[in-house]
Image (cartoon, coloured by chain):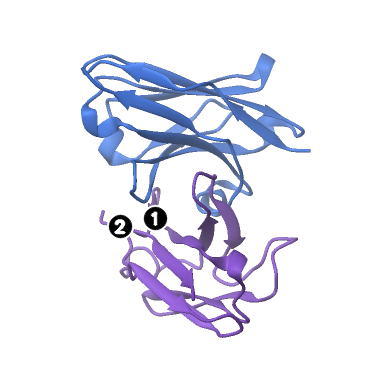
Chain colours: A purple, B blue
Amino acid sequence: QSALTQPASVSGSPGQSITISCTGTSSDVGSYNLVSWYQQHPGKAPKLMIYEVSKRPSGVSNRFSGSKSGNTASLTISGLQAEDEADYYCCSYAGSSTLFGGGTKLTVL
Amino acid sequence: QVQLVQSGAEVKKPGASVKVSCKASGYTFTGYYMHWVRQAPGQGLEWMGWINPNSGGTNYAQKFQGRVTMTRDTSISTAYMELSRLRSDDTAVYYCARGRGEVVVAATLFDYWGQGTLVTVSS
C-alpha cells in the first residue's frame, strides 16, 4: 500500500486560512471515516489534532477543522498563528493496516 | 497523567537486532492498543503495527512481517518492539503511541506518544 498523498508545502500569512489535502484511494480514505491529522514540531513527537475526519480532541483549538469528500480528506486551519508552523500528517485506516501521508510543511509567512 | 517513556538511543550494526521499550503510566495499560510508528531522518511517519496489551495479539504492517516482533509485559506496563536483520535504512526515530478505542478506531487515533527512540544502523 502506498502512502497517502499530501502537498509537500503550504504557506499563509498570520490571520489567513489554509487547507491541506490528503488523497488516498477507495480502499482507505474513501472507505472509512477514520482519518486523523497530526501536527509535528521539529524534534517533537506528533500531536493529534483531528480524528474520525472532523472531531477535535479536548484542548485542540477550534481553528483546526477536518473534512472529507470521496477519496480526499482535508485539514483547514483558520486564523493562522506563528505557532501553527509545523509539519502536518494525515492518517487513514486501510482495512487491517494504517497509512500515513507524506507530510506537509506549513510555513507561516 | 498519561505518559509513555521510551528507552534510550541505540547504535547497531547491519544484521543485528534492536529492542525498544515503552513504559506506560497514568492509565490502565491493558485497556488500550499500543502502536509503533517510525520516522527516518527528514522523512515522514511510517506505521509499523500494533499490540493488544490485554491479549498479546499483534498486527504488523506487511513491510515488516518476519522482521518485527511486538511484545508486552503487563506486570510492568511496558511494551516492546524488536526489529531484526537491521539495515541502514532502518535508521529512524521509533515512537510508541497509544491507540484509543476499539481496534479499528484505535488504528488512527493515537492520543499519546512516547518521546521517541533514535536507532542508528551503521557499520
What residue sits 45% from the left and 31% below the top? B58
Identify the residue at horizontal 22%, vertical 28% (top origin).
B88
* Crowd tier of the residue under label 1, counting other residues whose Cα lies within 10 Å: few below 14, some 14–19, many 20 or above: many
- Between marks 1 and 2, how big is the CA–CA gap? 6 Å
| Nearest the eye: A25 or A23 | A23
Would you say A55 lies left or right of A34 here?
Answer: right
Along the horizontal axis of the image, is B71 left or right of A4?
Answer: right
Mark 2 closeness class: few <14, some 14–19, many ≥20 residues within 10 Å: many
Q: Is residue A24 above or below residue A12?
A: above
Q: Secondary structure at mark 1?
A: strand
* Residue B9 visible in the picture: yes
Residue B1 is marked as: none
Query: Is A26 placed left or right of B95 in the picture?
Result: left
Residue A24: x and y in percent read 33, 68
Identify the residue position indicated by label 1 in the image: A100
Residue B87 in percent (x, y) is at: 22, 26
Query: Residue A8 location in percent, x, y?
Result: 33, 67
At label 2, the amino acid type is Ala
Whichever of callouts 1 and 2 sits on the residue coming sooner in the sequence is 2
Q: Residue furthest front?
A: A109
- Residue B11 picture quarter: top left
Does residue A75 lie above or below B23 as drawn? Answer: below
The amino acid beneath tag 1 is Phe
Q: Tell which subunit mark 2 falls on.
A: A
Q: SS of the residue at dot 2?
A: loop
Callout 1: residue from which chain?
A
Q: Is residue B52 above or below residue B100?
A: above
The answer to whether any part of residue A21 appears in the image is no
Q: Which residue lies under the disc numbered 2?
A: A3
